[in-house]
Amino acid sequence: MTLIHRAAIFVFTASLAMGADLSIGTWKFNPEKSKVRKPEDWKGRITVIANGPTADSVITKTGTTESSGPVFGKEVVVYYNGKEMPGAFPGTSLISTKVNDREWMQINKRGGKEYGHTKTTLSADSKTRTAEVHSTDAKGAAYDEMRVFDRVK
């Protein structure tokens, strides 16, 4: 193998490793570590994060666990490009950016106005994902939450 071939393989392998999204996987809500307003709404919540259609995106599916298995709601493609995209609910949009391999920021809008933002971080061992949420509800009341998810796979 020539030096040029080795260099090409190294560059290709390094680009794959750098592009890997560490949040890819299945995550289960941890109620003991979380601080949420309505814990009953979060009971059994799981989120699956998969590779998206582009290198700067992921697909998220959120649902709950039942005796028959997971039941998922709407699938959302999240692009980390800083551009406004449709949100999970009618009339909402989101702007997402990837700060680094372990930190993401998201701005949520309703009717064109910001109503919340979230900072999500991944632990050093990649086993815990924490979302710090600062938002307002449909009635305009402000709230803060800390949502902790543990990696299932």
Image (spheres, grey):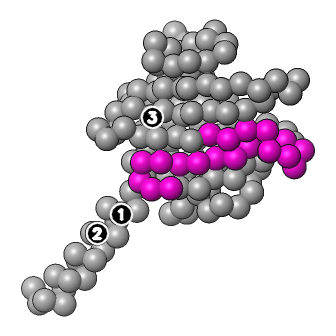
Q: CA distance from mark 1 to mark 3?
A: 19 Å
Q: Amino acid at mark 2?
A: Ala
Give the quarter of the figure containing the C terminus. Answer: top left
- Looking at marks 1 and 3 on the same chain, the residue that comes earlier in the sequence is marked by 1
Q: Are dots 1 and 2 in contact, CB under 8 Å? A: yes
Q: Residue 95, position in %: x, y?
A: 69, 53
From which residue to which does the magenta span run? 99-118
The quarter of the picture where residue 145 lies is top right
Left or right, 117 with reference to 29: right
Determine which residue is flagged by label 1.
Answer: 18
- Looking at marks 3 and 2 on the same chain, the residue that comes earlier in the sequence is marked by 2
Q: CA distance from mark 1 to mark 2?
A: 6 Å
Q: Residue 105, position in %: x, y?
A: 59, 48
Nearest the eye: 6 or 126: 126
Q: 10 Å neighbourhood of mark 3: few (<14), some, or many (≥20)?
A: many
Determine which residue is flagged by label 2.
Answer: 14
Q: Amino acid at mark 1?
A: Met
**Mark closer to the observer (1, 3):** 3
Q: Is residue 149 above or below residue 24?
A: above
**What mark, if any, has residue 49 been given in the picture?**
none
Task: Determine the residue positioned at 62% across, 40% down.
Answer: 118
Q: In this rendering, does residue 88 appear at all?
A: no
Nearest the eye: 131 or 74: 131
Q: In this rendering, does residue 131 appear at all?
A: yes
Q: 10 Å neighbourhood of mark 2: few (<14), some, or many (≥20)?
A: few
**What mark, if any, has residue 129 been given in the picture?**
3
The dominant secondary structure in magenta is strand
Is 104 one of the magenta-colored residues? yes
